[in-house]
Image: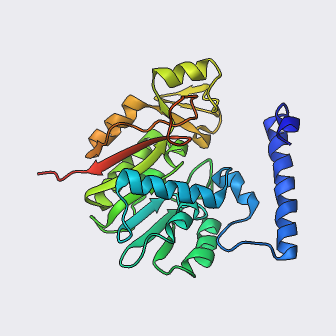
Amino acid sequence: MTNFTQHLPTWLKRSLRIILYWLLDTFDSLVGRNEAMIPPRMVSLIVGSGDFKKTGIVFLGYFIRYVGLRPDHHVLEIGAGYGRMALGLTNYITSPGSYDGIEIIKKAVDWSVREINSRYPHFRFHHADVHNRYSNQDGKKSAKEYLVPFSDNSFDVVILTSVFSHMLPQDINHYLSEIRRVLKVDGRCFITYYLLDDYAEKQIQAHRASQPFYHAFDGYLSTSRTTPENTVAYPETTVRELYARNGLKIEEPILYGSWSGRDNFLSYQDVVIARKELVL
């Protein structure tokens, strides 16, 4: 199907994918082939493609290796989606450890509560009614006003995957401030981005990057002229300044992704890991 559709318009490819996923999901439902804690294929149109279960397991390995995640840690995920990261953590995080996931798409929260929380009570999911032109146009609260509903110094690890790649600068600045607030001292955050450095910018200009960041805005690039939050890329220097401003120390090196065509990479997007330091 890939060879057949690669030259079709984007809207038509998406329409064909919707039809195919609907047919496959309907068939699975009819024959009772749905797997517990694995959402319907249609969800991939929101959370991204790839093997849902395998992705969670792979990222669990990243969290253990790069942020020192332990089974007794308290974990916060902002942008929990349909529980892709949570699923990978379910057989690792054990009481007194816990997981809390925040998500702006209400039906994703409801699904995660039904499928994951019902089986793992220490995995909790919370709806944040935050507006985003890409994924939650009906949200009532602006991102720069949203307060994470947890006390200061509550979490050992905070995770965001493919969240800041759909947010604007002032919103990211606010979220980083909130992340620092809820992290314990020496706690770490694991956040993915599309970062712009000389190499990535040259790849984009040469149309060799996998993301078409061809629309320039004030301080960032986007894949969409009309809806910048569709997918956003930021200069690495900007991201470093935001971390410094919010009291988060980046742990070098930044782990670059494959999206820009690099030969050496960790995952698809770029990963920034940072630690909350004690401020005297």
Quick check: 103 left or right of 122? right
* Count of numbered circles in the view: 0
Residue that sits furthest to the left in the current view:
280
Q: Is residue 59 above or below residue 7?
A: below
Point 37% across, 74% down: residue:
97
Q: Position of residue 12 (x, y in %)?
A: 85, 41
Q: Which corner quadrant of the image does residue 204 belong to?
A: top right
Q: Nearer the viewer, residue 92 or 141?
A: 92
Q: Nearer the viewer, residue 245 or 203?
A: 203
Look at the image and tell me whether residue 168 can be seen.
yes
Q: Which corner quadrant of the image does residue 151 belong to?
A: bottom left
Look at the image and tell me whether residue 128 can be seen.
no
Q: Is residue 140 above or below residue 31?
A: above
Q: Nearer the viewer, residue 256 or 243?
A: 256
Point 64% across, 54% down: residue:
47
Q: Position of residue 175 (x, y in %)?
A: 40, 51
Quick check: 8 left or right of 141? right
Q: Position of residue 117 (x, y in %)?
A: 54, 78
Q: Position of residue 264 (x, y in %)?
A: 50, 32
**Which quadrant of the figure contains the N terminus?**
top right
Point 58% across, 75% down: residue:
116
**Colour convention:** rainbow
Point 62% across, 41% down: residue:
230
